[in-house]
């Protein structure tokens, strides 16, 4: 939206330069008008008769419904973490045993 259109929408002349406090007051006035129409159930002057809005939500779980999905989402990450730890431990023990066989007495870190 261009600034000229915004000024006209808020009730100012197109070439005017309103102060921020005037813009804030005009914006609050528009909000209160729209909110009063919503509360009273009165239709707007530019709405068509017989028109309605249907809200369809897809693909985004709600805050309460997401609790069951957390476990399902966390399982693959647990597999990755435990697999990495297991593979690292296996490689470390194999390297330890290999060093133990090669240099049994010369390595002070091995028993």
Image: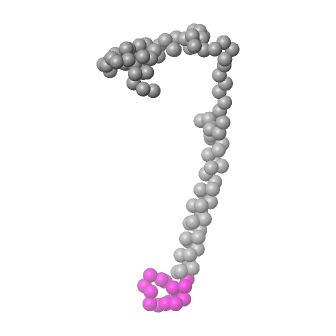
Which picture quadrant has residue 38?
top right
Span highlighted in magenta in the image: 97-111
**Residue 28 shows in the view:** no
Q: Nearer the viewer, residue 44 or 74?
A: 44
Q: Position of residue 52 (x, y in %)?
A: 66, 19
Q: Where, quadrant-wise, is the N terminus in this rendering? A: top left
Task: Please report the residue visible at 62 percent of the width from the left and 49 percent of the height from the top.
Answer: 73
- Residue 7: horizontal and vertical position, in percent? 40, 19
Q: From this view, report whether residue 91 is shown above or below residue 28.
A: below
Residue 103 place in picture, x, y as percent: 49, 90
Q: Is residue 15 visible?
A: yes
Relative to 65, is 20 above or below? above
Q: Is residue 108 magenta?
A: yes
On the rendered structure, is 34 left or right of 67? left
Q: Quadrant of residue 94?
A: bottom right
Above or below, 100 against 74 in this view is below
Residue 50: x %, y % from top left: 69, 14
* In front of the other: 30 or 75: 30
């Amino acid at each position: 939206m261009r600034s000229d259109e915004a000024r006209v929408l808020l009730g100012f002349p197109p070439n005017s330069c309103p102060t921020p406090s005037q813009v804030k007051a005009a914006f609050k006035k528009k909000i209160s008008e729209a909110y009063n129409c919503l509360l009273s159930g009165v239709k707007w002057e530019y709405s068509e008769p017989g028109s309605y809005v249907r809200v369809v939500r897809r693909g985004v779980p709600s805050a309460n419904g997401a609790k069951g999905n957390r476990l399902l989402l966390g399982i693959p990450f647990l597999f990755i973490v435990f697999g990495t730890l297991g593979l690292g431990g296996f490689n470390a023990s194999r390297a330890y045993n290999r060093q133990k066989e090669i240099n049994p007495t010369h390595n002070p870190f091995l028993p």
